[in-house]
Amino acid sequence: MELGAGIDICTHPNLVKTDAFVYSSQLDYVVDAHAMPFQDNSFDYIYSLAVFEHLHSPWVAAKEILRVLKPGGKVYVLTAFIQHMHGYPHHYFNMTDIGAQRIFADFEIISSGPSPHCPMDQLAVILLDLQEMSRNLKGNQSAEALCNSIEDFCRALPNVQAELIKLDANLEAWRRIAPGVEIVAMKPLDGGT
């Protein structure tokens, strides 16, 4: 099952696509992630991309995922960490990988950490807002220099992202600034709590 399918174009016949709103004719169900209309132990795998930051109670959604996953079933969640406020209808939470682990504490955590699937241009969007604010400081030479530096940085960023991540072998710096985090977890074979 895909939780938050949006306009995803995947057409795999076994994929159940859900979302809170009808964005596409390819959607199977309109659901609230906090109270899904599926029976217990219904799915082998659930994934959710860029949804958990939009949930008012992501810990409740994690419990729902636990409920509808079969024992031994897996979940993959990619969510915002350092990202610009975005999305419809609301943007509630950005989370660290430790926060994601806490939300999925009833699961067996397979892996969690900064995601390589979120481009650093998310950081550029934040910096461009800073640039826009700085432009309002007309006549301030420091603000002008900052604006030019931000533009140069944002232009160069996409070209160096992969190299920067490789350079940070232990991912400690990347963990502190990653635009997104991801977690892979499994429902315990005994069914969880």
Image: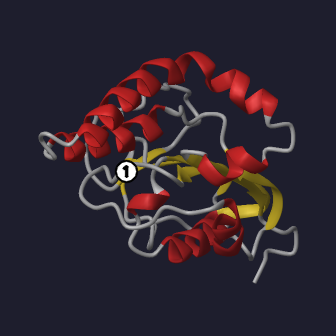
Q: Is residue 163 above or below residue 127?
A: above
Give the side of residue 28 with respect to residue 99, left or right.
left
Looking at the image, can residue 79 be seen? Answer: yes
Q: Is residue 74 left or right of residue 15?
A: right
Among all residues in the image, which is located at the extreme bottom? Answer: 193
Q: Residue at x 72, y 22 (%)?
A: 163
The residue positioned farthest toward the top in the image shown: 159
151 and 125: which is toward the camera: 151
Is residue 27 visible from the viewing direction of this image?
Answer: no
127 or 105: which is nearer to us?
127
Crowding near the residue tagged with mark 1, few <14, some 14–19, many ≥20 C-alpha atoms within 10 Å:
many
Compare residues 105 and 95 and report the one nearer the observer.
Answer: 95
Q: Residue at x 40, y 29 (%)?
A: 149
Look at the numbered disc 1 and give the secondary structure of its residue. strand
The residue located at (37%, 44%) in the rendering is: 126
In the rendered image, residue 187, in percent from the top left (x then y), is placed at 77, 65
Residue 15: quarter of image: top right
The C terminus, quarter of image = bottom right
Total labels drawn: 1
Residue 125 position within the rendered picture, expressed as x and y whole percent measured from the top left = 36, 38
Q: Position of 65 compared to 165: left or right?
A: left
Q: Which residue is mark 1?
A: 19
